[in-house]
Image (cartoon, coloured by chain):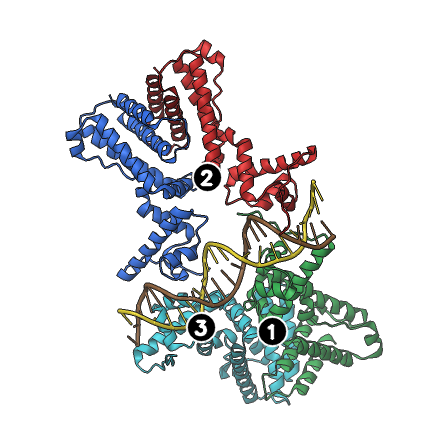
Chain colours: A cyan, B green, C red, D blue, E yellow, F brown
Amino acid sequence: MGNTDIRKPIQKRSIETKEKILKAGFELICEKGYYNTNTAEIAKAANVSTGIVYQYFKDKHDILVESLQNYGSSVFYPMIKVSEKDFAKNDLDTILRNMINKFIKNHKMSHSAHKEIMAMVHSDDAVAEIYHNSEIEMTDNLIKIFADNGITTDHLKEKVHVAVNLIDDLCHEVVYHKHDSMDYNVMIDVVVKCIKDLLK
Amino acid sequence: MGNTDIRKPIQKRSIETKEKILKAGFELICEKGYYNTNTAEIAKAANVSTGIVYQYFKDKHDILVESLQNYGSSVFYPMIKVSEKDFAKNDLDTILRNMINKFIKNHKMSHSAHKEIMAMVHSDDAVAEIYHNSEIEMTDNLIKIFADNGITTDHLKEKVHVAVNLIDDLCHEVVYHKHDSMDYNVMIDVVVKCIKDLLK
Amino acid sequence: MGNTDIRKPIQKRSIETKEKILKAGFELICEKGYYNTNTAEIAKAANVSTGIVYQYFKDKHDILVESLQNYGSSVFYPMIKVSEKDFAKNDLDTILRNMINKFIKNHKMSHSAHKEIMAMVHSDDAVAEIYHNSEIEMTDNLIKIFADNGITTDHLKEKVHVAVNLIDDLCHEVVYHKHDSMDYNVMIDVVVKCIKDLLK
Amino acid sequence: MGNTDIRKPIQKRSIETKEKILKAGFELICEKGYYNTNTAEIAKAANVSTGIVYQYFKDKHDILVESLQNYGSSVFYPMIKVSEKDFAKNDLDTILRNMINKFIKNHKMSHSAHKEIMAMVHSDDAVAEIYHNSEIEMTDNLIKIFADNGITTDHLKEKVHVAVNLIDDLCHEVVYHKHDSMDYNVMIDVVVKCIKDLLK
DNA sequence: TATGAATGAGTCTTCATTCAT
DNA sequence: AATGAATGAAGACTCATTCAT
């Protein structure tokens, strides 16, 4: 059956090759979707031959998974880096609004990427797992930041999670703008107040 | 080329045929996903020939779209029917918990269906539109119910939308159960309180 | 095996049905070609059901053959009707030029029809036979006319045939206009002189 | 969708593959006609897989077009190579008869090829163009030969074109032999005389 | 006679994967 | 390590023809 083990790249050159494939794969999949991207395209975009792909990856799906592990977080949570300084200078209301704005800006930038990746999250277990890990990571981050800044409430974990969901949904609402009758400024206010109550 | 117009079924027999295809298509797509279901399978499951499929549907994608229009709502919002009686008998807290439980139960029933359909929502514009229409419809329903039952608050539309998202996310959390460290009973309490504050 | 004999229409109504199919088939085939026309289209254009087609015709090819037998001559030789009066009034030169002009005009009118039918002449034996019969018929016609009008030369049959070919080719040249560097007025003069020499 | 660019074969191996496909395609199309030949057959006859066909050709039609560009001239004008020596040794009458015989012999050899290809000339624009280019090329050839050999007449271009048509038609007549009542030896004489008069 | 729904083999085309070099 | 030519199974879609009504 031919011993087709996947190469673990050690040399610098082959590490680069693998990464080129990963990056090209990620970009194409984000742009056009997993099912509408073929391996030949990925190889071409990565400037390598079609054959070599299968020395670094088990199959096409493997490219998806690994590329999400490498680059996915930028799409999943594009990314709340709330610095300590933010907290020093601002109140919670301002901090939340900063977060929301960053979130929205990022979503707008990677509109199609986000769509395509979220699609896979729903249908592909491996992708779902990566996504959820990234979600947890971010939640934990936030918890730590909140805790470090004097927010003391029980069930912080659950509350932060709910807060993140709120922001995420809000963000979708604003970016995809599907509901004409909705007033987004109002909605932002509603969400901010909601989170503030939550963390109180 | 060929002027293959799509038949609008009139006779009883052909209405039935179309519906068989629709139903079989919906079920298979829910179960295995759109890209992993082929037209031959759909035809076979519907107990018809492959050819007839293309007399009722323009192409495979058309089956997806029409089947979602017919059966999708059961997956999208499976479904909050808060009866007037509920309101007469119960307080908001109970009502919300009833809603949440119904939601969760339904999601559990159609686990894979929901996953596959939500995947398409993110990658397919036609599907996204159907989904969002269904979302609006449900939101409008709820608004009416709340209004009818003495809940008077400004920006009801936006608040209800946020509430629905909260329930939806909560539900995903519980059903897909990805975060081991999360206490779902707590989370339900958090969400219920959050919504109650929102609508106050 | 089901005795699927083809109906010979006797009643007036069924004669009409058959003719509707024939005419629709002929027109569509002329317009789009035999291989790009399907039986459903023909039935629809004829305002009959798809099923009925197979009660009047053995198969699709049969429609082609019969429709050519009925309507083909208009395309094959669209048509040199040199009246006796023409001869009384004019000299051979004028007569030939009249013929050529009529020919060209007709070809221009049924450009695509002619193309499609000639295609079949080359690949389909049944069609080829119909075409050649029609060719002979016209040649015989012309021979008679020439003979009746005092043109006496040996091998009239062969000469007329050559003359007809000359006119036909000339006509293609002018209608399809593929050779930019060719002067068509000159070419007409050349052909007319050629035929006159031939018949002298 | 898929960015399936057509490969321009560079390596010796792939040049050979492309040519095998071209040749097999040409032969099958000549034998059975374009519409009655499928890509699987072509691949099989070429001893390659079906997939590779689409790396060298955009689609089935592309095989037709390219194979005609490569091999078509042998069918279109199978081919009047009137050498200088012919002219030195013979008079025009003999030269013409040599040409005619060569023509007829060639047509007889590739009977079905000629039929099928001429069919496409009439229904397919791309094929028609190739054919007409080949026609022009041959006409130009002949003009040069005649001019080089002291034939001086005005409108040589048009006259040669008419002469070529005459030979072509004659040839069809003889090869396909549809008109039983025609004497072909006479017809050849008629045509030869006709051309001689033309070029005088 | 007529309808039009249904059949299913057949066709083109794509693409993940393998293999010779 | 790398190339890119080759494979061939699989899939969407068509259409001449048949059949139940």
Q: Are marks 1 and 3 on the same chain?
A: no
Res B70 → quadrant: bottom right
Element type where label 3 sits in the image: helix
**Side of C163 where C13 appears, left or right:** right
Q: Nearer the viewer, residue C56 or B93?
A: C56
Q: Which residue is mark 2?
A: C125
Question: Which residue is pictured at 62% across the width and 42% down the height?
Answer: C6
Q: Which residue is mark 1?
A: B115
Element type where label 1 sits in the image: helix
- Please indicate, yes or no, whether residue A78 appears anywhere in the rendered image: yes
Q: For the N terminus of chain A, which image quadrant?
A: bottom left
Q: Specify the subunit that label 3 lies on.
A: A
D186 shown above or below B175: above
Q: Which residue is mark 3?
A: A60
Q: Are marks 2 and 1 on the same chain?
A: no
Residue A165 placement (x, y as % from top left):
60, 77
Label 2–label 3 contact, CB within 8 A? no
Q: Specify the subunit that label 2 lies on.
A: C
**Disc 2 to disc 1, how far (Cα)?**
59 Å
Residue D14 placement (x, y as % from top left):
30, 60
